Amino acid sequence: MNSFIYNVSILKKVFKSGFYKTFLVFLALLSFILFDLFDSPVPITIYSLRFALGLLFTNFLAIIWFLYQIGVTIYFSYLYFFYEVDNSLEFILLRTDFFHFVLKKFIFLEMLLIVFRILFYCFLHFLFFKNVTFTVLFFMINIGVHVFVSTITFLVFIIFHSRF
């Protein structure tokens, strides 16, 4: 429980340190995309849900939206994993077992990311509820892509930290 509280306090510090601006841009872009989808004369279909999730690559805007979401995931993962390296490296080196510490951070971030992506999918699904049926494939891809990206960021963190 103590590590959970510590990880939550890191999340608060990361969010307050400037990540909230990136998240506000994310929300603004999402609102523009949703407004465009609902204002469009084309009926809302499963492609609309895929576009809003960032899983459609048919035009330039869809690719930019996907890359922005991946960029936000990488940026947040980086800020979270490298928090102690940037702010208090002695905490890792002197007070904790590195392996357990990093494993707890990884599990916590992955669980947080999974919960966020589930809530994001549910939000979009309920917006398109009358027009789009629930699809397990897009639900899993929505989660899997971002978990994969944060895992790669975690591996970069491990490689970086093992060099020092």
Image (cartoon, helix red, strand yellow):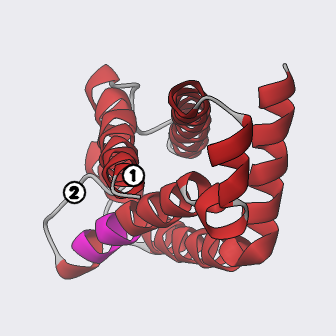
Image quadrant occupied by the C terminus: bottom left
Q: Is residue 130 visible?
A: yes
Which of 26 and 127 lies nearest the eye of the viewer? 26
Q: Which amino acid is tagged 1?
A: Leu
Q: Residue furthest front?
A: 94
Give how far across and how far down residue 77 sits, in percent. Answer: 50, 55
Residue found 26% across the figure and 50% down from its top = 47
Picture quadrant of residue 65:
bottom left
- Identify the residue position indicated by label 1 in the image: 53
29 with respect to 61 (left or right): right
Image quadrant occupied by the N terminus: top right
Q: Is residue 129 visible?
A: no
Which of 79 and 96 lies nearest the eye of the viewer? 96
19 with respect to 1 (left or right): left
* Real-space CA distance between mark 2 and mark 1, rounded to the nearest whole angstrom: 8 Å
Q: Are marks 2 and 1 in contact (CB under 8 Å)?
A: yes
Q: Which residues are magenta?
A: 63-68
Give how far across and how far down residue 83 sits, in percent. Answer: 64, 60
Which of 130 and 16 lies nearest the eye of the viewer? 16
Picture quadrant of residue 14:
bottom right
Is residue 131 rendered magenta in the image?
no
Q: Is residue 131 above or below residue 73?
A: above
> Callout 1 environment at 10 Å: few (<14), some (14 to 19), or many (20+)?
many
Q: Which amino acid is tagged 2?
A: Leu
Q: Secondary structure at mark 2?
A: loop
The main secondary structure of the magenta stretch is helix
- Identify the residue position indicated by label 2 in the image: 56
Q: Secondary structure at mark 1?
A: helix
Residue found 38% across the figure and 30% down from its top = 139
Give how far across and how far down residue 21 sits, in percent. Answer: 69, 80
> Callout 2 environment at 10 Å: few (<14), some (14 to 19), or many (20+)?
some
